[in-house]
Image (cartoon, helix red, strand yellow):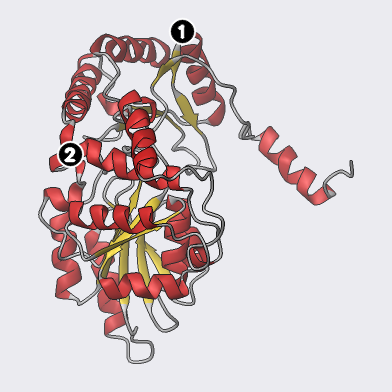
Amino acid sequence: MKKIPKNLSKKLEIRMQNNALRQLPSEKKNIDFASNDYLGLSQSEAVFHATHQYLIEKKRTQNGATGSRLLSGNHNLYSITEDFISNFHQVESALIFNSGYDANVGFFSSVPQKGDLILYDELCHASIRDGIQLSYAKAYKFNHNDFEDLEKFIVKFQSSKSQIPTNIYIVTESVFSMDGDTPNLEELVHLSEKHNCYLVLDEAHALGVFGVNGTGLVQQFGLQHKVFARIMTFGKGLGCHGAAVLGSEDLKEYLVNFARSFIYTTGLSPHSVATILIAYQHLEIEKENMHLLRENIIHFNQQKNLLGLKPIFVRSKSAIQSAIIPGNEKVKWIAKQIQEKGFDVKAILSPTVPEGQERLRFCLHAFNSKEEITEVLTLLSNFVF
């Protein structure tokens, strides 16, 4: 087999030298503090069997979508599920994409136009950044959760005589994937209305965790009618796959016509779409897992305070808790020690996070016990101090 070019080999060598080479992990049965399966729905037998029964009742036994949604792949489970999602999230429409990455790339590459301005939080997810790079709009990042810095950008460009933007899009996340923290959404909505901006929120890590029935932070604060677009990802709290862009009917129509990651890809299989529907229905009828998750978040925060770990953790009331341990080598070593004790905790290395911000990322779940939480934090304190 022909080897890769020398310049690519050099990049791999640099990664190895920096102790930052990514490798696919082998499947282990350690206690889960690493996955995004916050409610445990990915392993729910109830969801699995209900999805199978639903497909049998609908006489849907095909394995694939057979084509893009604009050709042969738009089976009727899509419209049923999108209607359910839009009602659940109290919006006019929902458009399902194959993944959260596809949704963000499709939205941000097609909606902001030349002459528009995108202002995005500096810690926004890579999928948002990749979509923005494909856009013809100008884009600038503002300091993390710093709305004074954001407003300075808005005022600067709105008062510029030479380059007044046609439209301004403010982009952020309701729960950040690496820090687990949240912006002040009410203040953000006020700012967007004050300056007539279009607010776009990624709620990937809020679905199933916040709000009544796990609707997310936007609906928890009753702001669903004041946000231009929301991206809901199903691979976290729903434990399945796919994503949806929520917004107006005309936004949905626009995306169907111009979002390339929607147009030029095979649709999800009927089984995948049915799983999304059943998982959403499960949120409405099964509230115990959300209650257990919220109790575990409280317990985790209490225990890290009791053990003196609070100074190294990013402040978070979400299911994502990150302990900052600078240096790839050090954080990888601590992660390895904890993993050898039976806990699946992942080290997040630079360049995924900025140098000096390397961390252990703890993901909490409804199925973690309080004893497991106490034990894993005790182990951490032994290796840190």
At a point 29% along the width and 15% down the height, the residue shown is 373
Secondary structure at badge 2 equals helix
Residue 127 at x, y = what percent? 47, 54
Q: Is residue 359 above or below residue 302?
A: below
Where is residue 374 shown, x and y percent of the image?
27, 12
Question: Which three-letter amino acid code belongs to the residue tagged 1?
Answer: Lys
- Report whether 41 appears left or right of 108: left
Residue situated in front as seen by the camera: 251 or 192:
251
Q: In the rendered image, which quarter contains the C terminus?
A: top left
Question: Which label number is shown at residue 341?
Answer: 1
Q: Residue furthest right?
A: 2
Can residue 265 be seen in the rendering of this structure?
yes
Residue at horizontal 38%, vertical 75%? Answer: 254
Q: Amino acid at mark 2?
A: Glu
Above or below, comparing residue 293 to residue 308 in the picture: below
Q: Quadrant of residue 379?
A: top left
Residue 123 seen in render:
no
Dot 2 corresponds to which residue? 284
* Image coordinates for residue 238, horizontal then vertical, percent: 32, 38
> For this view, does 23 lie left or right of residue 178?
right
Q: Position of residue 65 (x, y in %)?
A: 51, 53
